């Protein structure tokens, strides 16, 4: 009969058996997400889904409690992404041990978020306090209390000048060891390797963004560097950390100097010997100028990735 067909063509589907499991079991685990780009995508996609769900609930008259619960979920998601981002960036800090051992800090500088648009300076000062006295000294409501206290004691409520930053650091028993009007990489790198940190006043938007516009003078904290020579920036504008290329940091400092007549780097550390800090700190900080840092969100126009 012509119906007798050799069985071999029918067995071809068996090939899928040997293809599926082996590569999966032998493949290495996926690399950690590259923050900021991949995590920002995850954050944006998931947050967009939550926002869409919220709009749907509003459109169809869902109870107020359901909408508030969704708002809480969005807020918690944002905090989780920031925490993961900040933790990974800390792991990539190649001078972390020097910061702790040679610098005499209690911990790395915590990342705090400013509440008002001009609160960047006092928030950075509070980060320094957290590094000196321990993170718990500036956590939660206690941290906001520290920020409010520094603001009321040392500023006029319209930002923080370099001299006012010096006074805040003096009040925490910290020394402004050096200052530069621009970014001097040898000074910055040596300071970080010796265990010191830096308070930097720069422009709140990177010059060279699509509109080529600048923002206002803005304070951030430099807490280390990675193996590519990028600096670990802790930015109070949104409570985030990221790595910035030296040339981008230098560009933002120079823009602040030209647009706001203030900007530069303060090298900050624990005093090597007991000294009268008040006058010395103010004199050293005077290099940066006398205008206040009032900016918000230097990172917004940065394309810098924080993967290590």
Image (cartoon, rainbow, N blue to C red):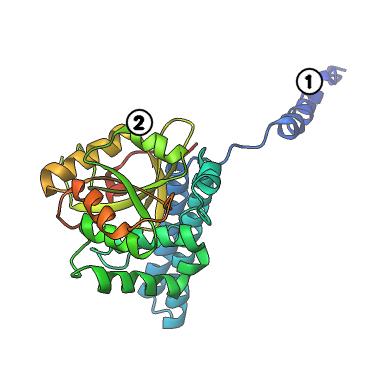
Q: Quadrant of residue 3?
A: top right
Q: Which residue is mark 1?
A: 9
Q: Nearer the viewer, residue 153 or 229?
A: 153
Rendering coords of residue 162 (x, y %): 22, 55
280 left or right of 275 in image: left
Q: Is residue 77 visible?
A: no
257 left or right of 77 in image: left
Label 1, residues with CA under 10 Å away: few <14, some 14-19, many ≥20: few
Quick one: SS at disc 2?
helix
218 left or right of 73 in image: left
Rendering coords of residue 302 (x, y %): 30, 42
Rendering coords of residue 238 (x, y %): 35, 58
Q: How many marks?
A: 2
Mark 1 and mark 2: Cα distance apart in space: 71 Å
Instruction: Report the disc number at residue 296.
Output: none
- In this view, 32 is above or below 4: below
Quick one: SS at disc 1?
helix
For marks 1 and 2 on the same chain, the one whose residue lies earlier in the sequence: 1
Rendering coords of residue 299 (x, y %): 31, 47
Q: Which residue is mark 2?
A: 186
Q: Nearer the viewer, residue 152 or 209?
A: 152
Q: Quadrant of residue 26?
A: top right
Q: Nearer the viewer, residue 149 or 3?
A: 149
Residue at 43% in and 48% down: 40
Residue at 15% in and 43% down: 257
Residue at 11% in and 45% down: 259
Contact? badges 1 and 2 (CB < 8 Å): no
């Amino acid at each position: 009969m012509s119906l007798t067909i050799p069985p071999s063509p029918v067995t071809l589907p068996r090939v899928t058996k040997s293809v599926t499991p082996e590569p999966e079991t032998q493949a290495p685990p996926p690399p950690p997400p590259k923050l900021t780009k991949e995590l920002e995508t995850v954050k944006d996609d998931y947050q967009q889904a939550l926002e869409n769900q919220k709009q749907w609930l509003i459109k169809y008259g869902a109870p107020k409690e359901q909408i508030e619960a969704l708002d809480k979920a969005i807020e918690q998601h944002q905090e989780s992404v920031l925490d993961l981002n900040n933790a990974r960036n800390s792991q990539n800090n190649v001078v972390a041990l020097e910061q702790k051992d040679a610098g005499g800090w209690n911990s790395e500088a915590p990342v705090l978020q400013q509440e008002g648009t001009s609160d960047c300076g006092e928030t950075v000062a509070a980060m320094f306090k957290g590094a000196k006295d321990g993170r718990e000294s500036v956590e939660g409501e206690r941290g906001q209390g520290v920020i409010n206290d520094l603001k009321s004691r040392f500023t006029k409520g319209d930002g923080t000048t370099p001299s006012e930053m010096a006074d805040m650091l003096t009040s925490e028993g910290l020394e402004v060891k050096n200052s530069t009007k621009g970014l001097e990489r040898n000074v910055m790198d040596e300071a970080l390797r010796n265990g010191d940190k830096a308070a930097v006043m720069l422009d709140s938007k990177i010059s060279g963004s699509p509109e080529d516009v600048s923002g206002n003078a803005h304070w951030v904290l430099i807490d280390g560097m990675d193996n590519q020579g990028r600096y670990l920036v802790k930015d109070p504008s949104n409570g985030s950390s990221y790595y910035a290329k030296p040339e981008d940091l230098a560009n933002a400092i120079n823009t602040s100097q030209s647009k706001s007549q203030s900007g530069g780097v303060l090298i900050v550390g624990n005093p090597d010997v007991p000294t009268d800090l008040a006058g010395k700190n103010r004199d050293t900080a005077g290099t940066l100028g006398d205008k206040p840092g009032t900016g918000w969100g230097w990172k917004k126009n940065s394309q810098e990735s924080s993967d290590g």
